[in-house]
Image (spheres, rainbow, N blue to C red):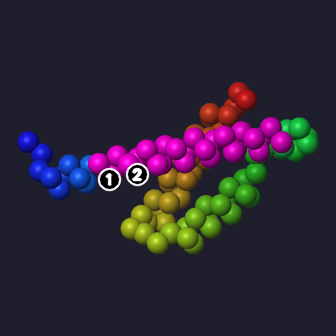
Amino acid sequence: MTDALTRRLREQIAERDRAILDAANARLRLVAELKHHKETEGMSFADPEQEERLLSALEGANGGPLSNEGVRALFSEILALTKREIADD
């Protein structure tokens, strides 16, 4: 049997997980649009300098409790996943 606090916290965590999923899908749609635009304009999609600026900005915006190393690991994985997901677009 699960107590009320555990149940409530799990519900709140599940809500956050769904929000993360929605945000990831929205981000993926925007990146696909950006990729299409850049390719149409003859520009390279890959921009390592922009990725580093993004990671640094996110570390600067981090208020914790996630460490800056955690921020970098999380968003590096998001960037890698995004590239894999839109590779065939």
Q: Residue at x 68, y 63 (%)?
A: 53
Residue 48 at what x, y percent from top left? Answer: 72, 53
What is the spatial separation of the Cα atoms under label 2 and label 1, in whole angstroms? 6 Å
- What amino acid is found at the position of numbered circle 2 in the picture? Arg
* Displayed quadrant of residue 65: bottom left
Instruction: Using residue 36 as the reference point, say whether residue 77 is left or right of it.
Output: left
Asked if 75 appears above or below 31 in the picture, the reply is below
**Disc number for residue 59:** none
User: In terms of secondary structure, where does tag 2 sit?
Assistant: helix
Measuring from the top left, give residue 12's x and y in whole percent: 32, 53
Measured along the vertical axis of the image, is residue 46 above or below residue 53?
above
Please give left or right for residue 2 compared with residue 19 in the image: left
Image quadrant holding the C terminus, namely top right
Residue 50 pos. (x, y %): 73, 58
Q: Which mark is residue 12?
A: 1
Within 10 Å of disc 2 (Cα), the crowding (few <14, some 14-19, many 20+) is few
- Judge whether 58 appears above or below 86 on screen: below
Q: Are marks 2 and 1 in contact (CB under 8 Å)?
A: yes
Q: Which residue is mark 2?
A: 16
| Of residues 7 and 46, the one drawn nearer to the viewer in this rendering | 7
Q: Which residues are magenta?
A: 11-37
